Amino acid sequence: MASPRFTNLVRRWVPLCIITLPLLCGFAMSDFNDHIAAKRKYLSQEARKMFYHAYDNYLTYAFPHDELKPLSKSFTDSLSELGNLKLEHLPQSYNGSALTLIESLSSLVVMGNNTEFERAVLWLSENLTFDVDARISLFECNIRVLGGLVSAHLLATDSSKRLSQGKYNNELLDLANDLGRRFLWAFNTSTGLPYAWINLKHGVMEDETTETSTSGCGSLILEMGALSRLTGNPIYDAAALRALRKLWSMRSSLNLLGTTLDVETGEWLEYSSGIGAGIDSFYEYLLKAYILFGRDEFWHMFHSSYLAVQKHFRHGPCFRYHEADMRTGKATYWQLTSLQAFWPGLQVLVGDIPAANLTHREFFYVWKRFGVLPERYLLDRAMLHPTEKYYPLRPELAESTLYLYQATKDPWYIDVGESIMKSLNMYTKVDGGFASIRDVSTMQLEDHQHSFFLAETCKYLYLLFDSSFLASENYVFTTEGHPLPVRSSWHDWLPDVSMPTDVTSVKINNLSTKSSALSSQICPALLATLKEDQPVESACHIHDGRASHRCESHEECGIDSTTCRQRSCSLAGYCGLWLLI
Ligand code: DMJ
């Protein structure tokens, strides 16, 4: 029996503890939250400083040309490949396409600088022309220029009244329309697949290469779809959709696509495939087009591709992605590439948060090891690729970090963002801007500040620390980081109501759920097709063959919903996560 003294102690202290502990915890939690809020505020100011260091130097040394050379404090007209023409032989009126200015428009809005946004919009409205004898990449010009203009037009004309009344008369949309018309030349092929290169003045040049990439054909639908909806001319959407459908018809029996192809014959030139260069934004645009336009067709294409990727490219407990032959699924290259780092962000959109978190950690591990992400890292030999050792200020890891933070609110991602920002300031900041890294093993710099550093890298870091821009509307970010608002008038099935926040309430078949273009968690189309006894967990979820989970072979087992890993058949005849694959 307990002594009376002990009983007294318990009587006196236990109720006190029960009352005070939650209070203490509450105080500790609120202290912690205050600390995170203060840290985010400070870091958002640092991200803003980074952006303006890049922007101001661009304006001083490179504007109105395309991009800044921060070491020599000069410029490059990187968007156009001018062949034998030298700049001084160009007409007087030619002054570059001010690419970095176009790419900065939406970042200025995200950072709340409406005055500079207006100044840039008005300058572009008066001076930008696409009537130039320049050979441009359709893919790059679409994501950077068309995307930049369409997004800025939407931001200039939404209800926020960012521009002084009467000053803007849809000039950016007119420019986008003009550019879109020039793009259409590229689609004049027997397959509907567009040429990778066009001359803005003369169309497709004689002897132009017929080789292009999967991304080049399959990442046009957001910008061209938006342009059609804004102008009321369906021709842009139709061209991009036709190309996408043709591309999808070229998939293998494994639902995989290659990375390069011929636009005239419609045949694959490169069968090795993955989630990185040449195909990355193809997956991204299927899901984002579904979120923006609500067409089930996009979801079906995305879902099949996503499952195929998880099944054939992912390996190991660490959730790395190798490359494989689209026809056989056999591994070709065991490489982690910088571009692949967008994948966890896409996984957040689809709701596979645990998988996104694990993959993100892989990329951050390599970032920490080298200080930044090398373009290619050989997984099988745990070493840098002999030639592709560069880091051109790419945004993908910051992008995925933002998506993961939005979905989880885990402060660890704030630390990751802080670490990314520190590295950028330490290794790439120079007097004249931010320079790319030529070799991550020596940190030797290269004289180039890519426009996506302003459109994406700085923007994603800023949004990680200050997401007030996201509170006003539900946005889809293009692959170049340009926000497009999700609007019911553009959408096949969203209810006709305004969406004042970044979370949209969606009701399908009496089921109500919340969906956001930044962390949708649950894909509505999947929800609509569900039977009542099948809980929605993830886009990669495949049920075991039998409800009892009994099996005779691995083929009868499905894909685990939380980890997206292939389940296998145990010796006792049950499907489960028995082996690490
Ligand atoms: C950007 O131009 C776009 O994100 C594109 O989809 C591929 N990556 C570059 C930056 O790394």
Image: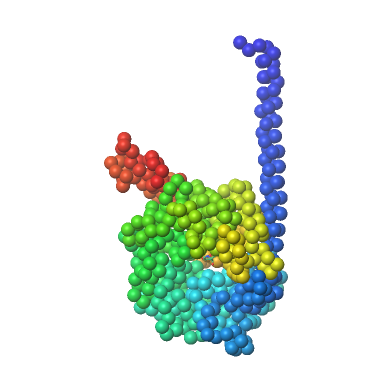
Residue 522: image x %, image y %?
Answer: 48, 52
Residue 55 shows in the view: no
The quadrant in which the N terminus is found is: top right
Q: How is the image coloured?
A: rainbow
In-image side of 559 versus 389 (left or right): left
Residue 277: image x %, image y %?
Answer: 47, 64
Q: Is residue 151 above or below residue 383?
A: below
Residue occupying the point 68% across, 45% down: 33
Residue 144: image x %, image y %?
Answer: 55, 71
Q: Nearer the viewer, residue 40 or 58?
A: 58
In-image side of 321 versus 439 (left or right): left
Residue occupying the point 67% across, 19% down: 10
Q: Residue furthest left?
A: 552
In-image side of 279 versus 467 (left or right): left
The quadrant where residue 65 appears: bottom right
Residue 485: image x %, image y %?
Answer: 56, 64
The quadrant where residue 93 appears: bottom right
The quadrant where residue 306 appears: bottom left
Q: Nearer the viewer, residue 383 or 419?
A: 383
Residue 369 shows in the view: yes
